[in-house]
Image: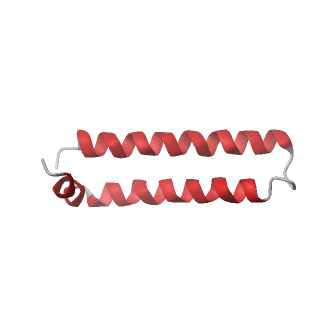
Amino acid sequence: MDLIFMMKERLGLFAFLFAFLLLNALLLVAIWKVKVQLPKPLLVLLTMCCTFFIFATIGFIVSTLSFGYNS
């Protein structure tokens, strides 16, 4: 199927996942902007969490576009 058609068909879930991905990316950038003020273990923990959520969201987007859901 055409990629654009699949994106239109699953727009609700795709938009939510893309917004979550963007939110995590912005949070990661904000964390690294103020890294001087944060303790090192907290910085590492937040970076690992954001990175995990970014990769998980990318995986969910790919699986949504590839396999989809029954609609």
Q: Residue at x 64, y 57 (%)?
A: 27
x%, y% of residue 11?
27, 60
Q: Which of the 4 image quadrants contains residue 4?
A: bottom left
Q: Which of the 4 image quadrants contains residue 5?
A: bottom left
Residue 14 against residue 51 in the figure, above or below:
below
Decide if residue 52 is on the left or right side of residue 1: right
Q: Residue at x 31, y 39 (%)?
A: 63
Q: Residue at x 56, y 39 (%)?
A: 52
Q: How many marks?
A: 0
x%, y% of residue 22?
51, 58
Q: Which of the 4 image quadrants contains residue 23?
A: bottom right
Outermost residue on the left side: it is 1
Q: Residue at x 42, y 57 (%)?
A: 18
Display coloring: secondary structure
x%, y% of residue 49?
63, 41
x%, y% of residue 47?
68, 44
Which one is nearer the viewer's eye here, 30 or 9? 30
Decide if residue 2 is on the left or right side of residue 29: left
